[in-house]
Image (cartoon, rainbow, N blue to C red):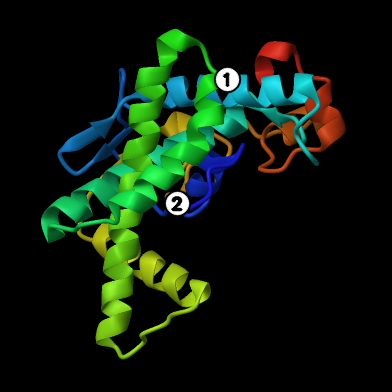
């Protein structure tokens, strides 16, 4: 498991959520069964991600990096935390183990990223990222076990990825998940799949704002507080 500059966004890309009609409110980004994902956690991870992207952009160390709207990062963090909670619940239900040395190695790779954020935020940031990694490893271990039971002793990465996705999808069907409409979950249940605005975008600016992959030139024109990197 490699910790890189977009590690959290990469995690977010694999999440799949079930959408219900009741809208969470207050400090609730999503409800996952009887647990909640706080909006404050989503905002915190968004801020941490943007800090690391901004610092890398300023130092010129990021290769092929592009600026991204803060809203896009925020949606990614919402997906990440919902999937992390689903993984945690699955691991608890199945009493899943994980390779501790792999987790230690992943966090060691993450250390440079951790140092780039304010000292007062590091403990919370580390704990949250470690929880995300741990849940991934637990489901990964279960996927390997399932494949071994099927006679696949040396599975490819594609086989493991499919097995992980299948396990997460099956578990998701047994859990009620409600995503706050502000994250644009839509009918797909994936945050960011629809424009959370009630109005239909007409201008080119509005259409770019609602795009999952807005034009880089448009992103560059956003105010500093609305873009990362």
Disc 1 crowd, CA 10 A, few/some/many (<14, 14-19, 20+) = some
Q: Are marks 2 and 1 in contact (CB under 8 Å)?
A: no
List x then y, in percent, for residue 11. Answer: 48, 47
Q: Nearer the viewer, mark 2 or mark 1?
A: 1
Q: Residue at x 12, y 56 (%)?
A: 93
Above-or-below relation of 102 to 44: below
Upstream in the sequence, badge 2 or badge 1?
1
How far across and down, in percent of the image, does residue 79 sit?
44, 42
Q: From the viewer's perspective, tell me whether residue 177 is left or right of residue 174.
A: right
Task: Tell me if 124 is positioned left or right of 75 in this view.
Answer: left
Percent coordinates x, y for residue 189 in the rendering:
42, 50
Q: Residue furthest top?
A: 120
Give 93 or 25, whichever is nearer the viewer: 93
Q: Is residue 141 left or right of residue 209?
A: left
The residue lying toward the viewer, choosing from 126 and 72, is: 126
**Which residue is at 44% across, 45% downward?**
106
The residue positioned farthest toward the bottom in the image shown: 151
Q: Which mark is residue 221?
A: none
Residue 25 in sight from this viewpoint: yes
Q: Residues within 10 Å of mark 2 (few under 14, many from 20)?
A: some
Q: Which mark is residue 187?
A: 2
Measuring 36% from the left and 87% from the top, which residue is drawn there? 152
Q: Residue furthest right?
A: 217
Residue closest to the eye, 154 or 147: 154
Report which quarter residue 64 is drawn in.
Answer: top right
Q: Helix, strand or loop at disc 1?
A: loop
Residue, disc 1:
116
5 relative to 224 in the view: left or right? left
Residue 198 in view of the camera = no
Which quadrant of the structure image shows residue 123? top left
Q: Residue at x 37, y 66 (%)?
A: 164
């Amino acid at each position: 498991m490699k910790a890189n500059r977009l590690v959290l966004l990469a995690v977010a890309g694999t999440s799949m959520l079930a959408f219900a009609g009741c809208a969470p409110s207050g400090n609730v980004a999503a409800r996952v069964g009887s647990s909640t994902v706080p909006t404050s956690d989503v905002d915190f991870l968004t801020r941490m991600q943007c800090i690391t992207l901004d610092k890398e952009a300023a130092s010129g160390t990021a290769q092929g990096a592009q600026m991204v709207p803060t809203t896009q990062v925020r949606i990614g963090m919402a997906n990440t935390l919902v999937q992390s909670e689903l993984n945690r619940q699955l691991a608890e239900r199945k009493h899943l183990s994980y390779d501790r040395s792999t987790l230690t190695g992943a966090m060691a790779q993450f250390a440079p990223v951790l140092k780039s954020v304010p000292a007062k935020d590091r403990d919370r940031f580390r704990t949250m990222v470690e929880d995300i990694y741990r849940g991934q490893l637990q489901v990964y271990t279960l996927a390997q076990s399932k494949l071994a039971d099927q006679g696949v002793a040396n599975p490819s990465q594609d086989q493991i990825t499919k097995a992980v996705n299948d396990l997460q999808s099956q578990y998701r069907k047994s859990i009620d998940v409600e995503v706050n409409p502000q994250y644009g979950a839509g009918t797909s249940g994936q945050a960011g799949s629809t424009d959370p605005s009630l109005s239909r975008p007409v201008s080119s600016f509005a259409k770019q704002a609602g795009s999952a992959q807005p034009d880089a030139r448009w992103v560059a024109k956003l105010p500093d507080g609305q873009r990362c990197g």
